[in-house]
Amino acid sequence: MENEKLIPLLDALVGKTVAKWEFVGEPYWRDEPNPGEGVRLHFTDGTKFTVYERQQAGQVGYEFGEQR
């Protein structure tokens, strides 16, 4: 992940209020999602921020955008 792409994204999170959070990924034990897959933050202004592991290779990915 290149810093010049990540810094503005993280700056956009400053001052937002988290409305709820959830783990992402498929359930792995009973009906619980795997926390190792990642986490998604939902903000009160309708945006969401997702941080997740990519391809089990130790790479971290992210998504930031409007809530659908």
Image: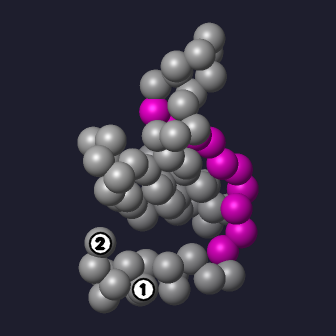
Residue 67 spot, x, y in % from top left:
49, 53
Q: Earlier in the sequence, mark 1 or mark 2?
A: 2
Q: Nearer the viewer, residue 59 or 50?
A: 59
Q: Nearer the viewer, residue 11 or 47?
A: 11
Q: Is residue 30 visible?
A: yes
Q: Secondary structure at mark 1?
A: helix
- Can you say whether 20 is above or below 18 in the image? above
Q: Secondary structure at mark 2?
A: loop
The majority secondary structure of the magenta stretch comes to strand
Q: Nearer the viewer, residue 5 or 57?
A: 57
- Can you say whether 23 is above or below 67 in the image? above
Residue depicted at 70% across the width and 50% down the height: 20
Residue depicted at 56% across the width and 28% down the height: 33
Disc 1 packing (10 Å; few <14; some 14–19; many ≥20): few
Residue for badge 1:
7
Residue placed furthest toward the top: 30
Residue placed furthest toward the front: 57
Q: Is residue 65 visible?
A: no
- Can you say whether 8 is above or below 67 in the image? below
Residue depicted at 39% across the width and 48% down the height: 53
Magenta span includes 20: yes
Residue 27 spot, x, y in % from top left:
52, 21
Q: Which residues are magenta?
A: 16-25
Disc 2 packing (10 Å; few <14; some 14–19; many ≥20): few
Q: Amino acid at mark 2?
A: Met
Q: Nearer the viewer, residue 29 or 16?
A: 29
> Image quarter for residue 64?
bottom left
Between marks 1 and 2, how big is the CA–CA gap?
10 Å
Residue for badge 2:
1
User: What is the quadrant of the N terminus in the image?
Assistant: bottom left
Q: Amino acid at mark 1?
A: Ile
